[in-house]
Image (tube, rainbow, N blue to C red):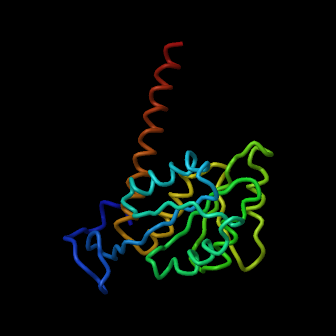
């Protein structure tokens, strides 16, 4: 259903959970966790945080290592649902086991961002993130693909959130309009040659 076809109304509560707006469906605030194996990953991961915040999605960013703080990472994943999270994003470079460790301890969706490092230009992290054993899925985006990780998380949440779906629809319309305008400008320039 197109964004303009959805009805929005005043804020209210449903089942004791805060709503953004009343819609034909419903809009329940779910948080997204953005976890990184090292604070050195933040310059890449920052794009996920800004994209989520731009869509009005509450998020928390944390440093947790699959190797240096494994207990904390496991506890975080096990308690994520009860703490209001709907999706976990995990960014890591090199061995890149963070997303897999989180996925092993929750049934929430986990999205992995392989981080490019000086070793193998991130190919090692990509393979470590994407090659999960059967039964423990991790959705994996491109190397340093933080913006797409945030948009994938938003799409997952939008399955049950009409307000968020409207925002994503509007974003796609704006992207389309920008590309069509660029095409128009290019065609005009080509005509002058």
Q: Nearer the viewer, residue 126 or 68?
A: 68
Residue 191 in picture, x, y percent from top left: 50, 18
Q: Is residue 186 above or below residue 17?
A: above
Q: Residue at x 30, y 60 (%)?
A: 4
Q: Nearer the viewer, residue 172 or 151?
A: 151
Q: Residue at x 45, y 45 (%)?
A: 175
* Residue 139 in which image quadrant: bottom right
Q: Nearer the viewer, residue 59 or 39?
A: 39
* Residue 25 in which image quadrant: bottom left
Residue 60 in picture, x, y percent from top left: 46, 63
Q: Is residue 160 left or right of residue 4?
A: right
Q: Is residue 43 left or right of residue 68?
A: left
Quadrant in the picture for the C terminus: top right
Residue 176 in picture, x, y percent from top left: 45, 45
Quadrant in the picture for the N terminus: bottom left
Q: Residue furthest bottom?
A: 15
Residue 170 in picture, x, y percent from top left: 38, 54
Q: Residue at x 58, y 81 (%)?
A: 78
Q: Is residue 118 above or below residue 56?
A: above
């Amino acid at each position: 259903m197109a964004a303009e076809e959805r009805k929005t109304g005043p804020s209210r509560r449903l089942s004791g959970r805060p709503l953004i707006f009343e819609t034909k469906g419903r809009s329940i605030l779910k948080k997204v966790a953005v976890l990184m194996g090292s604070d050195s990953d933040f310059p890449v991961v920052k794009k996920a945080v800004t994209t989520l915040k731009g869509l009005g999605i509450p998020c928390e960013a944390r440093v947790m290592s699959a190797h240096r703080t494994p207990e904390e990472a496991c506890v975080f994943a096990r308690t994520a649902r009860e703490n209001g999270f709907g999706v976990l994003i995990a960014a890591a470079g090199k061995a890149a086991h963070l997303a897999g460790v989180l996925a092993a301890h929750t049934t929430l969706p986990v999205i992995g961002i392989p981080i490019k490092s000086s070793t193998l230009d991130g190919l090692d992290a990509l393979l470590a993130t994407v090659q999960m054993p059967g039964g423990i899925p991790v959705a994996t985006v491109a190397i340093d693909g933080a913006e797409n990780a945030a948009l994938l998380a938003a799409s997952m949440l939008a399955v049950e959130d009409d307000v968020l779906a409207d925002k994503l629809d509007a974003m796609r319309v704006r992207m389309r309009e920008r590309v069509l305008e660029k095409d128009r400008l290019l065609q005009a320039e080509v005509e002058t040659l």
